[in-house]
Image: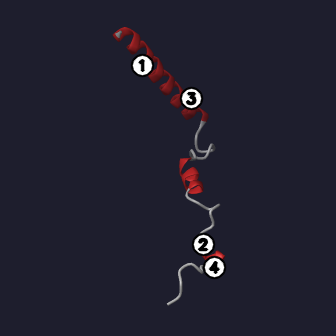
Amino acid sequence: MESRTNIHPNDLPDPRRGILPVRLKRLRVANPEKLSPARGLMIGFLFSFLIWAAVIGFFVTF
């Protein structure tokens, strides 16, 4: 029965190729070519409207 301590270095997983690159690939937004300027503006206006609605709602409530 051989010992588990004599693992060859090539058998170990490379620490540089961890889970992080996979997560970064998943978090990356869709290709800029697919996102048209009109759609980008629409999303921007939507988010700014939501932020303004939250600010105004906060001051109206309190």
Q: Are marks 3 and 1 in contact (CB under 8 Å)?
A: no
Callout 1 amino acid: Ala
Q: Which residue is mark 1?
A: 54
Q: Which residue is mark 4?
A: 8
Which comes before the other along the chain, label 1 or label 4? Answer: 4
Q: Marks 1 and 4, how far apart in space?
A: 58 Å
**Placement of 25 over or under 17, stated as above or below:** above
Q: Position of residue 60 (x, y in %)?
A: 37, 9
In the foreground, 23 or 5? 5
Q: Position of residue 59 (x, y in %)?
A: 40, 10
Callout 2 amino acid: Leu
Could you tell whether 47 is left or right of 58 in the image? right
In the foreground, 16 or 56? 16
Which comes before the other along the chain, label 3 or label 1? Answer: 3
Picture disc at residue 41: 3
Picture disc at residue 37: none
Q: Which residue is mark 2?
A: 12
Callout 3 amino acid: Leu
**Placement of 22 over or under 53, stated as above or below:** below
